[in-house]
Amino acid sequence: MNLTNKLGNLAVAAMMFGLAAKASAQMLINGAGATFPYPIYSKWFDEYVKVDDSVRFNYQSIGSGGGQKQILAQTVDFGASDGPMSDENLAKASTKLLHIPTVAGAVVVTYNLPGDIKLKLDGPTIVDIFRGKITKWNDARIAGQNPGVKLPDIDVVVVHRSDGSGTTYIFTDYLSAISHPWQEEAGKGTAVNWPVGLGGKGNEGVAGQVKQTPGAIGYVELIYALQNKLSFADIKNAEGKYISPSLDSITAAMAAAKVPDDFRFSMANASGADAYPIAGTTWLLVYQTQKDPAKGKKIVEFLNWALTKGEEMAPSLDYAPLPKILQERALARVKEIKF
């Protein structure tokens, strides 16, 4: 090997050593939870490395139930959930846990039917489909809301989440808000006892089951339906209008929500002519008092960035950014984190 080649190899080795040293010097912040905001959180974590390359985020998209469990067990630095933690679960925390709202999104009712069919569905019909009371796609209650649409005489195959899920919380929060029988029989939560149906893990799992199963109906976050080119229904809202999920209709629902001091609020069946009725926000769960000062400082810096610069990225992924007044309240809450 000549001198030039040796020098070249040494330069490459030095560069690789430098990259490895830089990677090992990065602080790793671990999080876990909701699949609902996974597309926007992935975008944020990738973009934030360009802002601060001394930190790297490792986020496991395991469902809101898992995110709540892991932050309570303190096996992660932050959790993520689309369903607010219950008083009972909050009481299990070693110190005060904060709910930091980030973005809002829509849960859509998606289905697999032949042809390019755009359905309209009201709440009671959705409830009875997921209760197993409506079992055929050409049922009179579906047909009555969709005049002129040729509905097939095939079985309805219900698909729901099999894991603890904030998407499930948002969906069942809506079903409970509009139906006393549903509230009594199944209720709302990140996991419920489904009367009928097949289970799929994560929004990805439900989207996949619906896509490959003729006659299937399920519920997923809007971005997953768009990414998988799945059909989804317009839903009749509290004012009696059939509304399509969109940035505007999600924002209208969020604007109608009453937000308490702890930020644990619902957007289910929101009032307002333009509000989409199956919508919800999603939260990052962080301890008010951080055990690791260095990590705590980095988490606060990231949250300040996410709630300002990060919010600007939300619409491109079909999430609604926080209204300005709620954004300001969330930033004020971040200032209360001690490290």
Image (cartoon, rainbow, N blue to C red):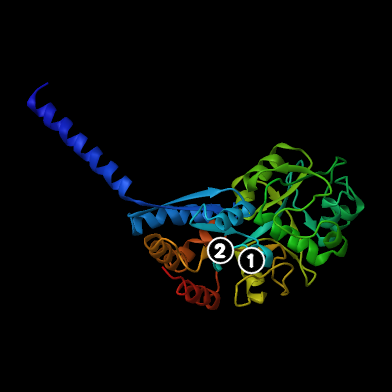
Identify the mark at residue 94; answer none if there is no mark: 2
Q: How many marks?
A: 2
Q: Which corner quadrant holds the C terminus?
A: bottom left
Viewer-closest of 81 and 198: 81
Residue 191 horizontal/vertical position (percent)? 72, 53
Please say whether residue 109 is visible from this viewpoint. Answer: yes
Q: Which corner quadrant holds the N terminus?
A: top left
Local crowd at mark 2 within 10 Å, few (<14), some, or many (≥20)? few
Viewer-closest of 125 and 146: 125
Please say if 316 is above or below 269. above
Please say if 96 is above or below 107. below
Residue 144 horizontal/vertical position (percent)? 88, 57
Residue beneath label 1, please? 91
Q: Describe residue 220's horizontal placement relative to residue 297 as left or right.
A: right
Q: Cβ–Cβ below 8 Å for labels 2 and 1?
A: no
Q: Quadrant of residue 235?
A: bottom right
